[in-house]
Image (cartoon, rainbow, N blue to C red):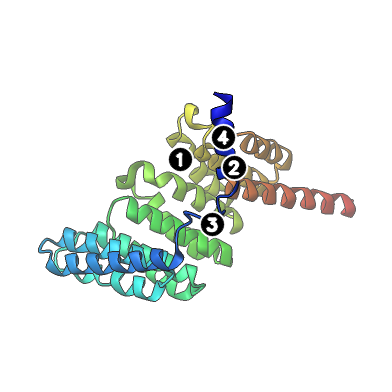
Amino acid sequence: MKKLFLSFLPGLLFISPSEGAPDPAARTAAREKAAAVFLQKAEAAKKPVEIAGALFKAAGEFKELKRFDEAVFYLLKIPCVKGVPRHESACAFRAAAQCRMEQLRTSEAIELYHRACACRSGKWSEAVSCRELGEIYMDLGFFDKAVAVFAQAADNPKLGGERFSSLCGKAAALVRLGRHSEAGEAFRQAAAMLPPEKRQSNAGGLLYLTEADVLAGAGKTASALEICKKALAIPKVNWKLARKVRLLMADISSGNKAKEKTK
């Protein structure tokens, strides 16, 4: 068996590293062809959901090709389809907003996110659109706008478990505005939605981050740092979440050092 195996080695050693690698031009052509096929299906379809589905797929191909303007063009056709469900419209506006964010056209993305939220789909598309728009406002420092957007999903019991992340976002935004009692209430509502067995997940990490934020806002910095450590101890915690936790810890630590200097 050893001789048989070794007899293959010379051939293996001379295989070109690029042999069998996908051809970028062929891949592009395949996506363009797929987009054309989906557009034909959209034109031939009769049911609103089928038309929307084909347009989504065509837009997806253009997005993969980094042709975001074309992707947005076809996504914005979806809400114009007569009889299309509000959920489909919300998804289309959200996808278009994500394309604009890829292009760093933030003001256009914000407008599209608002249109997604305004669909009031009553489904996950509404909750996730509110959450993503709220996060953009948080990054821009528009905390009052962030509260309003998060609240749309957070305060809507019809959205069920989809409210969780918006409640966490609402609490964080309220902390920034100095509305600590309201932030604590939003955190408690979020905590009530997450059972103990889910605390070692990314959702648990988000809850710990929110709790630490609320505690730090109330001046309980030592407790906040301990909660941050719990978040970072979660196995396979999302790197973006971990980064936010570390930034909060750094802010708390720098604040503590500033207080020591003034004593």
Q: Which residue is mark 2?
A: 10
Q: Quadrant of residue 2?
A: top right
Q: CA distance from mark 2 to mark 4?
A: 7 Å
Look at label 1 and name its amino acid.
Answer: Gln
Dot 1: few (<14), some (14–19), or many (≥20) neighbours within 10 Å?
A: some
Q: Nearer the viewer, mark 4 or mark 1?
A: 4
Q: Nearer the viewer, residue 148 or 159?
A: 159
Task: Of the two numbered discs 3 and 4 on the same chain, state the one appearing first in sequence.
Answer: 4
Mark 2 and mark 1: Cα distance apart in space: 66 Å
Q: Decide: is 2 above or below 254.
A: above
Q: Is residue 248 left or right of residue 263?
A: left
Q: Amino acid at mark 2?
A: Pro
Vertical placement of residue 105 versus 248, above or below: below
The answer to whether residue 137 is visible is yes
Give amino acid for label 4: Ser
Would you name the residue on which mark 3 appears?
18
Say how many tags the image has.
4
Q: Are marks 4 and 1 in contact (CB under 8 Å)?
A: no
- The residue lying at 42 percent from left, 55 percent from top is 151
Helix, strand or loop under label 2: helix
Of tags 3 and 4, the one toward the viewer is: 4
Q: Residues within 10 Å of mark 3 (few under 14, many from 20)?
A: few
What is the quadrant of the N terminus in the image? top right
The label number, if any, that marks residue 7 in the structure image: 4
Between the C-alphas of marks 3 and 4, the distance is 23 Å
Question: Mark 3 or mark 1, which is nearer the start of the sequence?
Answer: 3
Amino acid type, mark 3 = Ser
